[in-house]
Image: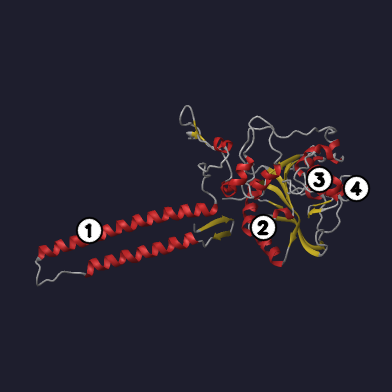
Amino acid sequence: MGSVSLNIGDGTARFRRATICSSAVNILMLFSVITTNLFALYAFTSSPDHHNQNHLQQSLHNHKNITLISQHVSLILREIDSSQKKLARMEKELLGYETIDLSRPNIAGELKLFLQHYRLPLGKDSKTGMTEMVASVGHFCEKSADLLTQYMTYKVSSQCPDDWSLGQKLILRGCEPLPRRRCFSKSISKVGLLSFPASVWKPVSDKIVTWSGLGCKNFDCLNSKKLSRECVGCFDLVKGYENQRYVKAKNKNDFVLDDVLALGSGGIRIGFDIGGGSGSFAARMAERNVTVVTNTLNIDAPYSEFIAARGLFPLYLSLDHRFPFYDNVFDLVHASSGLDVGGKPEKLEFLMFDIDRILRAGGLFWLDNFYCAGDEKKRALTRLIERFGYKKLKWVIGEKADIITGKSEVYLSAVLQKLVRVS
């Protein structure tokens, strides 16, 4: 409950959380130290009347004092231990780390069944040390117990409710991963899908995606909206700018894909695109025989289904979730303004460390048109990047008209190479 330090190279990141719990523990410890010293002072300064007591009585009196002090010290230690446990429980409840209370009367039966602990039939497993199988569910699901119960209320072995938007709402509230369900997801006929690579730049039919829970009910409607800085008309693969992205630069912050790939040492084979819009980055990489996984959620649009219809790989995952990849596996990680998770510097820092974890030494981190809301934002991001010790292959800070506000805003584009770190 104090501080956490992360040492990378010559930089140190400290996160300090001054909570009610940590302050209470400090006050309690200070009180116990003062009390213990007062008892010790009492033991060594108090003495019996030498005129009325003999040497034996003096020894007995001192022994009683020592016993009394021992009793008080033991009591203080027990109180400290009890208080620390209470404070830990309070913090768990405040942060949502406590387990879900399955004794509530309104908890869905399927949720109770999923979260049950199942003991291994042969006892302790020699490889993992496990004695039981435990279901995985996001710790913040406790904070959305009513929504979770609604999500887990369905008829077993029947069609699932059309509630993908409810599941996404839970994910955005930190309830990730979601519990598994024993029902059949809604099936949509995927008539008209083309074979790869012809599918990459062909229009996707409105009829092969799910529109429930969305304001728009077709791609024409979506193309008329400014969904994000990465997606303005991004579902139009024939007209507009989408089919020119990464091959033709509109300003100095736009890097041409082939120029970036030429910077990669040892070749670029697999990549990861964070907040990749409709998947056009992965499409251009596929044309160059590079496999790219595109991280996305269906916020205001059916991104995942659209990317899959193009023959590309969507990963339905929020950026609050640890990337489900092993260390040092990607040759390239591409990200843009979607990297800024809710404008929280601590979240961005944790996310950057996770990106660094999955990027191999010699690999490239391409920061593509990152929106800098102000000078302080730009300086904070620059300081954060410099702590990783990446080699700057390209670094451009420039102004351009923001596609959301129409005003001239500052953007940062960079290509950085991860170096080998010697421990």
Secondary structure state at the residue bearing disc 3: helix
Q: Nearer the viewer, mark 4 or mark 3?
A: 4
Q: Circle 4 sits on which residue? A: 239
Q: Nearer the viewer, mark 1 or mark 3?
A: 1
Secondary structure state at the residue bearing disc 1: helix
Q: CA distance from mark 3 to mark 2?
A: 26 Å
Q: Earlier in the sequence, mark 4 or mark 3?
A: 4
Q: Nearer the viewer, mark 2 or mark 4?
A: 4
Q: Amino acid at mark 4?
A: Lys
- Going by the image, does 172 lie left or right of 405? left
- Going by the image, does 366 lie left or right of 171? right
Q: CA distance from mark 1 to mark 4?
A: 89 Å
Tags 2 and 4 touching, CB below 8 Å: no
Q: Amino acid at mark 3?
A: Ser
- Which numbered dot is residue 67? 1
Tell me where residue 127 appears, x and y as whole percent: 50, 32
Q: Circle 3 sits on which residue? A: 280
Q: Amino acid at mark 1?
A: Thr
Tell me where residue 153 appears, x and y as whole percent: 62, 38
Secondary structure state at the residue bearing disc 2: helix
Tags 1 and 2 touching, CB below 8 Å: no
Residue at the outermost bottom position: 51
Query: In this view of the protein, which residue sits in the foreground, 409 or 75?
Result: 75
Query: In this view of the protein, which residue sits in the foreground, 270 or 275?
Result: 275
Q: Earlier in the sequence, mark 1 or mark 4?
A: 1
Q: Is residue 381 above or below residue 325?
A: below
Q: Circle 2 sits on which residue? A: 385
Q: Amino acid at mark 2?
A: Ile
Q: Earlier in the sequence, mark 2 or mark 4?
A: 4
Q: CA distance from mark 1 to mark 3?
A: 77 Å
Give the residue at x 56% y 42%.
106
